[in-house]
Amino acid sequence: MGMVGTDTLAVVQTEKPIKGQTEQLVVGVEGKPSAYNAGTDSVVSASVLMMIIVALLALAASWGFVVRQTRNFFYRENERTTNVPDSNKEIRSQVLLVAFTTFIFSVSYFAYFTHVNDVHDMAMSKNLLILLFVGVFVAYILIKVGLYQLVNWVFFHGKEIEQWNKSQLYVTTMEGLLMTPVALLFIYGKLPLTTALICGGFVVILCKLCTFYKSYLIFFRRFAAFLQIFLYFCALELIPLAALVGILEAYNGNSIINF
């Protein structure tokens, strides 16, 4: 860490007893650490690079799945539709991309957190802080998936649930991929915080709208149940998101507490 002095340096004149020459002695004061920058952290950079490589490999392995989901996203399959089966390799690769999505959101929030807070005053190490945020986002994904599975199992049929699960894999994957350039520009490209928040918010809102439309298309289109779809979407999508934001902001507001 570089040190930035805050006070004027004092100059003291001293006399050497032997040669009678005047010597200048510079007396300084203790500076304070320069602001932390996630972009210069070798652990963050290595983690981002590794996860991007994993994401690219997973995307290449599941490219057929991505193309099929993109082509059919705005259409509802019926009982007579003949589908190309998705391989286990494609599904596993999509799960890896979901893990990448949780990571990219975690490191994005970490960069935001260290941008607005002085992390030098915190007892928790920055590496543990990243792991904490990863844990929070993983818990968010798992809780949301669990709630969806429970509700869908009670009210809908197997083929519809399978379509929904695959569409959710696709939407979550696209959310992470779309968020990646925003995160990289904010961490390494000096993208202003306000611009990064607007771009990140746009990505999240776009993906939520796609989720809303897909839930209508798969579960509610034939019933014309507009009230039910709003209840379904709010209970299973917006409430978990609001809880996630509330937890993160509550932690942000108490970030100087010693752990």
Image: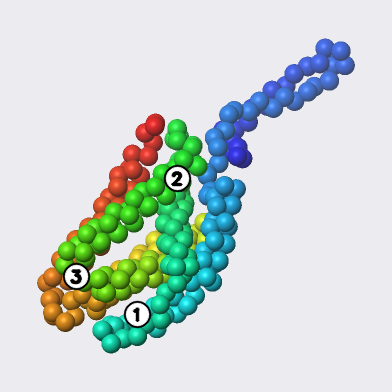
Q: Classify 228 as above or below 144.
A: below
In the image, is 14 to the left or to the right of 208?
right
Q: Could you tell me which residue is drawn at 36 percent across and 48 percent down?
A: 136
Which of discs 1 and 3 lies nearer the camera? The answer is: 3
Kindly identify the residue that appears in the image at 22 percent across and 59 percent down: 150
Badge 2, how many Cα within 10 Å: few under 14, some, many 20+?
Answer: some
Q: Position of residue 87 (x, y in %)?
A: 45, 72
Residue type of the residue flagged with mark 3: Phe
Amino acid under disc 2: Leu
Residue sitting at x 46%, y 53%: 107
Q: Secondary structure at mark 3?
A: loop
**Mark carried by residue 73:** 1
In contact (CB < 8 Å): disc 1 and disc 2 = no
- In this rendering, the count of numbered labels is 3
Q: For residue 148, say whether it is visible.
A: yes
User: For the residues marked 3 and 2, what is the alpha-carbon distance in whole angstroms?
Assistant: 36 Å
Compare marks 3 and 2 and give the one earlier in the sequence.
2
Q: Position of residue 124 (x, y in %)?
A: 45, 35
**Disc 1 and disc 3: Cα gap in Å?**
19 Å
Helix, strand or loop at disc 1? loop
Q: Which numbered disc flags the more N-terminal residue, 1 or 3?
A: 1
Q: Which residue is mark 2?
A: 131
Name which quarter of the figure residue 94 lies in: bottom left
Please indicate whether residue 22 sits to the left or right of residue 141 in the image: right
The x and y percentages for residue 114 are: 46, 46
